[in-house]
Image (cartoon, rainbow, N blue to C red):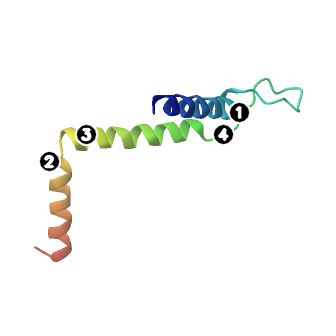
């Protein structure tokens, strides 16, 4: 069982290395580095992911804020 796990880990690490870390051959002369994903909105994506992760961490350690917010929303919907 251990041998099968080692072979599968080697296979998946090799695939990830090929997909993300192997450089592609540049077709234009002014390109020094190419990635396999679009980098135009990378800063915005990282900002959104960091904001959502911080909300999840806050919700994990202090769920009272979200419980009160949900209570106020429900009471507002039903007109109390």
- State the separation of the CA atoms marked 4 and 2: 38 Å
Q: Which mark is residue 40?
A: 4
Q: Nearer the viewer, residue 2 or 11?
A: 2
- State the separation of the CA atoms marked 2 and 1: 42 Å
Mark 4 and mark 1 in contact? Answer it, CB < 8 Å. Answer: no
Q: Which mark is residue 72?
A: none
Mark 3 and mark 4 in contact? Answer it, CB < 8 Å. Answer: no
SS at badge 2? helix
Above/below status of 51 relative to 75: above
Determine which quarter of the picture holds residue 17. top right
Q: Which residue is mark 2?
A: 64
Instruction: Look at the image and tell me in which quarter the N terminus lies.
Output: top left
- State the separation of the CA atoms marked 3 and 4: 29 Å
Q: Which residue is mark 1?
A: 35
Mark 4 and mark 2 in contact? Answer it, CB < 8 Å. Answer: no
SS at badge 1? loop
Q: Position of residue 45 (x, y in %)?
A: 53, 41
- State the separation of the CA atoms marked 4 and 1: 11 Å
Of marks 4 and 1, which one's residue comes earlier in the chain?
1
Which residue is painted at 70% across and 37% down in the image?
36
Of marks 3 and 2, which one's residue comes earlier in the chain?
3
Of marks 2 and 1, which one's residue comes earlier in the chain?
1
Q: Is residue 63 left or right of residue 21?
A: left
Q: Of circles 4 and 1, which is in front? A: 1
- State the separation of the CA atoms marked 1 and 3: 33 Å
Quick one: label 2, few (<14), some, or many (20+) residues within 10 Å?
few
Which residue is painted at 21% across and 51% down in the image?
66
Q: Which mark is residue 58?
A: 3
């Amino acid at each position: 069982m251990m041998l099968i796990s080692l072979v599968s880990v080697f296979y998946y690490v090799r695939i990830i290395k090929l997909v993300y870390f192997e450089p592609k051959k540049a077709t234009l002369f002014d390109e020094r580095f190419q990635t396999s994903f679009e980098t135009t909105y990378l800063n915005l994506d990282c900002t959104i992911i960091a904001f959502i992760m911080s909300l999840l961490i806050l919700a994990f350690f202090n769920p009272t804020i979200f419980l009160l917010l949900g209570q106020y929303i429900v009471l507002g919907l039903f007109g109390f």
